[in-house]
Image (cartoon, rainbow, N blue to C red):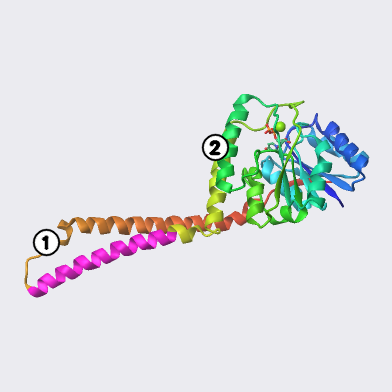
């Protein structure tokens, strides 16, 4: 199969017939073999009914329905697991992204060496309250990730060589950072394609301003995971042990000096009267705390293996 189009959707019933028709038209014009994977992220409108209806007339449609709303990244992740095409294209369901871009995305991957192609909505149809924070966000992400040729990490329209989506896992708000995860997984040919962008035709945006905060926390966490190779214990634990040892040796020194003064019969101040004693106490306490922090971080990062257990209610 040439192309899998993965579409995460949450309450997008009105857009789906037009979207799938449009994708079908483009695919047929270019003679691609394809599938459209519609992932219903726990919608509470009639989206799933619409998907069932579309499936009756359109065998290339694959539908997956989550039992509840898990977020766009989870929806993409399930789509990636299911995808069979050589090239996997992701696009939003709301008709803001154009299926007309798919042939060029496909060409970049199959003929021009790209592992991943990210859309750039150079001309956007979104309110300023969204475009300004997004600009800031993109520049921070560009600097932190070292992927300097991308302008628009958040664009829902992207294409991947199949190996890429099979090697990355997305959760939280990570869908914005798939290029970063891909780069870390060793897929370095990351290209950008300027794409058309349309105003939302039906319904409203599914994300509030909180997305930027969540997104930034995710960026920090993947940055951290990348730097310390999923071993937070190595970072916190090492500083903790060092601090503990400093405190421990200072205490030993104080005890040694006290014992020596007793042995020599000289006058020596009480250990608890000396500032060094308090320094060692602080070093030991901070060391223990940091070590425990590292331990907890290690547990959290291990249990993150369970992140991707979504509950699928229906599949067609
Ligand atoms: N979406 C989703 N789960 C969510 C929120 C959004 O699957 O919890 C889908 C949504 O239906 C759309 C895409 O993700 O297909 C992008 O969402 P939206 O258009 O609301 O984002 P925006 O264009 O405003 O960035
Ligand atoms: Mg949208």
Instruction: Give the residue drawn at x 38%, y 55%.
Output: 289
Instruction: Give the residue drawn at x 85%, y 46%.
Output: 35
Q: Is residue 100 left or right of residue 240?
A: right
Instruction: Classify 175 as above or below 305.
Output: above
Q: Which mark is residue 269?
A: 1
Labelled pair 2, 1 in contact (Cβ < 8 Å): no
Q: Is residue 19 left or right of residue 218?
A: right
Q: Is residue 255 left or right of residue 13?
A: left
Residue 58, can we see it?
no
Q: Which residue is mark 2?
A: 213
Q: Secondary structure at mark 1?
A: loop
Give me the C-alpha separation between circle 2 and circle 1: 53 Å
Instruction: Give the residue drawn at x 66%, y 48%.
Output: 179
Quarter of the rendering containing residue 5: top right
Instruction: Classify 18 as above or below 157.
Output: above
- Classify 10 Å Cα crowding around label 1: few (below 14), some (14-19), many (20 and above): few
Q: Is residue 8 left or right of residue 245?
A: right
Q: Which residues are magenta?
A: 237-264
Q: Residue 243: horizontal and vertical position, in percent? A: 34, 60
């Amino acid at each position: 199969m040439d192309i899998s189009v993965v579409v995460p959707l949450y309450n997008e019933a009105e857009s789906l017939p037009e979207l799938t028709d449009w994708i079908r038209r483009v695919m047929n014009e270019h003679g691609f073999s394809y599938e459209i994977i519609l992932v219903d992220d726990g919608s509470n409108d009639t989206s799933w009914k619409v998907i069932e209806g579309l499936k009756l007339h359109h065998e290339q449609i694959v539908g997956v329905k989550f039992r509840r709303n898990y977020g766009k990244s989870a929806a993409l992740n399930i789509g990636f697991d299911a995808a069979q095409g050589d090239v996997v294209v992701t696009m939003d369901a709301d008709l803001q992204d154009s299926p007309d871009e798919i042939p060029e995305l496909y060409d970049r991957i199959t003929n021009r060496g790209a592992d991943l192609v990210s859309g750039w909505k150079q001309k956007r149809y979104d309110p300023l309250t969204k475009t300004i924070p997004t600009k800031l966000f993109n520049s921070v992400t560009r600097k932190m990730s070292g992927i300097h040729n991308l302008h628009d990490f958040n664009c829902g329209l992207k294409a991947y060589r199949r190996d890429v989506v099979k090697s990355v896992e997305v959760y939280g708000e990570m869908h914005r950072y798939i290029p970063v995860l891909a780069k870390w997984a060793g897929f370095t040919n990351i290209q950008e394609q300027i794409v058309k962008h349309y105003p939302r035709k039906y319904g409203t945006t599914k994300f509030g301003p909180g997305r930027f905060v969540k997104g930034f926390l995710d960026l920090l966490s993947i940055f951290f995971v990348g730097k310390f190779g999923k071993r937070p214990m190595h970072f916190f634990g090492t500083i903790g042990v060092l601090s503990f040892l400093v405190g421990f040796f200072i205490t030993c020194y104080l005890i040694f000096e006290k014992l020596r003064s007793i042995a020599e019969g000289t006058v020596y101040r009480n250990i608890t009267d000396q500032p060094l004693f308090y320094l060692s106490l602080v070093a030991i306490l901070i060391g223990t705390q940091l070590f425990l922090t590292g331990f907890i971080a290690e547990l959290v990062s291990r249990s993150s293996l369970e992140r991707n257990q979504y509950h699928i209610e229906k599949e067609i």
